[in-house]
């Protein structure tokens, strides 16, 4: 039996992506968790957006890319007319997504599954509306950590990231002063065990072959460089109010133990389940209820081995770079993330090597004229810094090509 949340509404941002589609699958199996009020999509998959509208019948649809809005709108209107159902109110542009993110209230939930720091403004809008924020868009917490945590009420953000969802579960009944440190697990990605020399010529196709998770393009590439783990360390610092030296990383290639908490008394609490993001999604939507049958339970009647090993920090410098940037503050993590987003695009269009991704982050962070921002500069200051970082990255990339 599914726990009832009478009247709870959901706004789903990034509906046609990997997390977005899995969220709708969870709702299909557990329709009483929430009623879909609005969907926001980028605009790249019009037919999928139309099918989602037919299936979940939202009142509103926001399309972030104005250049694709007409195509999406046409597909949605045709599908609705064909099925004889009322079409949602359709709006286009990034501001429409932010507006939708802030449209609900304290009884409701916004699931932010947008990729990239473009998710920051919708995150802030959702928080100021008072709705629960189920947060897959880790970039908004990493980039705007101070602003986002200052805007969030206690318990308002529920992480939708297998590691952080695991830690939140392990922390049930634990006081903050009883935590010694967190152990964030990492699969190690497709290139675990390789040397830098062996990584020189890897291609985007090889980087996209993740051993345990099927995800969007950016996060999959980030898993190969370990930038994803680096972002997750900082995400954990803000989500659980801990300094970075108390957030450790351990490689666990099976991706069964999703993370652990070691307490001051020396015991370690782990959360384990098969790798399936629908568990993290359903947990965040239904908390504190538990949705029956959300994950397939582990079967211990079959022999299995779970292994743990340290990260090869020499081959994968991404985590150490992020720790240093986070310690420095002043928006350095916003620079880190923005340069990474540019670098991933350059890697896919063939103008940057795999090892060049973290090298570019390091290079931009080391620029002597890098601006610093503080909380007083607000979100505008942060966005201006991001623009500076993207420009700096593009300038360095252009110089490499010429
Ligand atoms: P994805 O690329 O599959 O999907 C992202 C979606 O967001 C796309 O459909 C895109 O069209 C849409 N989008 C982009 N800009 C938008 C905007 N301004 N407004 C509305 N929609 C917009 O990515 P994903 O793998 O689903 O990841 C989404 C987020 O969740 C990322 O931050 C990622 O790090 C995080 N996450 C993903 C997984 C996973 O298993 N996929 C696990 C943990 C965390
Ligand atoms: Mg994760």
Image (tube, rainbow, N blue to C red):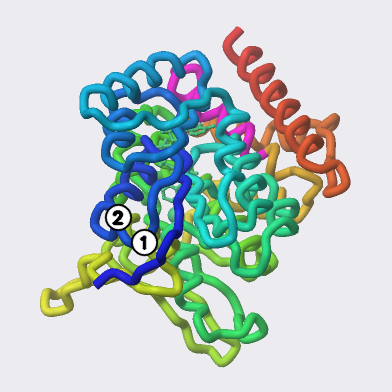
Instruction: Identify the image quadrant of residue 199.
Output: top left
Residue under numbered circle 2:
26
Q: Secondary structure at mark 1?
A: loop
- Magenta segment main secondary structure: helix
Q: Secondary structure at mark 2?
A: helix
User: Can you say which quadrant of the picture contains the N terminus?
Assistant: bottom left
Instruction: Tell me, yes or no, whether the highlighted magenta stretch contains residue 96.
Output: no
Residue 385 vertical placement versus 162 (above, below): above
Q: Check whether the beta carbons of the residues at disc 2 and disc 1 lie within 8 A of each other.
A: yes
Real-space Cα distance between discs 2 and 1? 9 Å
Residue under numbered circle 1:
33
Q: Which mark is residue 342?
A: none
- The stretch in magenta equals 336-353
At horizontal 34% and vertical 31% (from top left) the residue drawn is: 86
Residue 127 vs residue 319, the one in the foreground: 127
The percent position of residue 288, horizontal first and vertical second, equals: 45, 74
Of callouts 2 and 1, the N-terminal one = 2
Classify residue 41 as left or right of residue 81: right
Q: Report crowding for label 1: few under 14, some 14 to 19, many 20 or more residues within 10 A (C-alpha).
A: many
Residue 173 vertical placement versus 351 (above, below): below
Q: Can residue 321 be seen in the rendering of this structure?
A: no
At horizontal 52% and vertical 46% (from top left) the residue drawn is: 137
Residue 253 vertical placement versus 73 (above, below): below
User: Can you say which quadrant of the picture contains the C terminus?
Assistant: top right
Classify residue 72 as left or right of residue 67: left
Instruction: Tell me, yes or no, whether the highlighted magenta stretch contains residue 345.
Output: yes
| Residue lying farthest to the top in this orientation | 402
The percent position of residue 393, horizontal first and vertical second, equals: 66, 24
């Amino acid at each position: 039996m599914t726990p009832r949340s009478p009247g709870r509404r959901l706004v789903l941002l990034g509906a046609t992506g990997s997390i977005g589609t899995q969220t709708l699958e969870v709702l299909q199996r557990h329709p009483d968790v929430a009623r879909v009020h609005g969907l926001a999509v980028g605009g790249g998959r019009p037919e999928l957006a139309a099918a989602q509208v037919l299936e979940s019948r939202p009142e509103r649809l926001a399309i972030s890319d104005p250049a694709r809005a007409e195509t999406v709108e046409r597909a949605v209107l045709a599908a609705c007319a064909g099925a004889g159902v009322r079409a949602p109110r359709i709006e286009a542009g990034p501001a429409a997504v932010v507006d939708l993110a802030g449209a609900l209230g304290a009884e409701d939930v916004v699931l932010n599954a947008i990729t990239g720091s473009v998710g920051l403004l919708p995150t802030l809008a959702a928080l100021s509306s008072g709705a629960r924020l189920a947060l897959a868009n880790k970039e908004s917490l990493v980039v705007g950590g101070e602003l986002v945590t200052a805007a969030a009420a206690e318990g308002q953000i529920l992480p939708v990231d297998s590691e952080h969802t695991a830690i939140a579960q392990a922390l049930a009944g634990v006081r903050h002063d009883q935590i010694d440190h967190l152990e964030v697990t990492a699969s190690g990605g497709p290139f675990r065990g390789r040397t830098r020399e062996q990584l020189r010529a890897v291609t985007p196709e090889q980087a996209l072959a993740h051993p345990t998770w099927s995800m969007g393009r950016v996060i999959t590439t980030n898993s190969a460089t370990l930038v994803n783990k680096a972002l997750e360390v900082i995400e954990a610092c803000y989500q659980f109010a801990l300094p970075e030296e108390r957030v450790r990383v351990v490689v666990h290639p099976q991706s069964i133990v999703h993370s652990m908490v070691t307490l001051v008394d020396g015991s370690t609490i782990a959360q384990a389940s098969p790798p399936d993001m629908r568990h993290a999604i359903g947990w965040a939507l239904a908390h504190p209820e538990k949705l029956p049958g959300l994950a397939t339970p582990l079967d211990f009647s079959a022999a299995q081995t779970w292994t743990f090993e340290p990260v090869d920090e020499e081959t994968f410098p991404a985590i150490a770079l992020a720790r240093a940037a986070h310690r420095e503050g002043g928006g350095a993590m916003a620079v880190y993330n923005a340069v990474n987003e540019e670098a991933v695009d350059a890697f896919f269009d063939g103008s940057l090597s795999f090892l060049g991704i973290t090298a570019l982050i390091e290079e931009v962070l080391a620029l002597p004229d890098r601006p610093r921002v503080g909380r007083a500069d607000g979100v505008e200051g942060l966005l201006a810094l991001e623009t500076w970082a993207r420009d700096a990255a593009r300038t360095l990339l252009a110089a490499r090509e010429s």
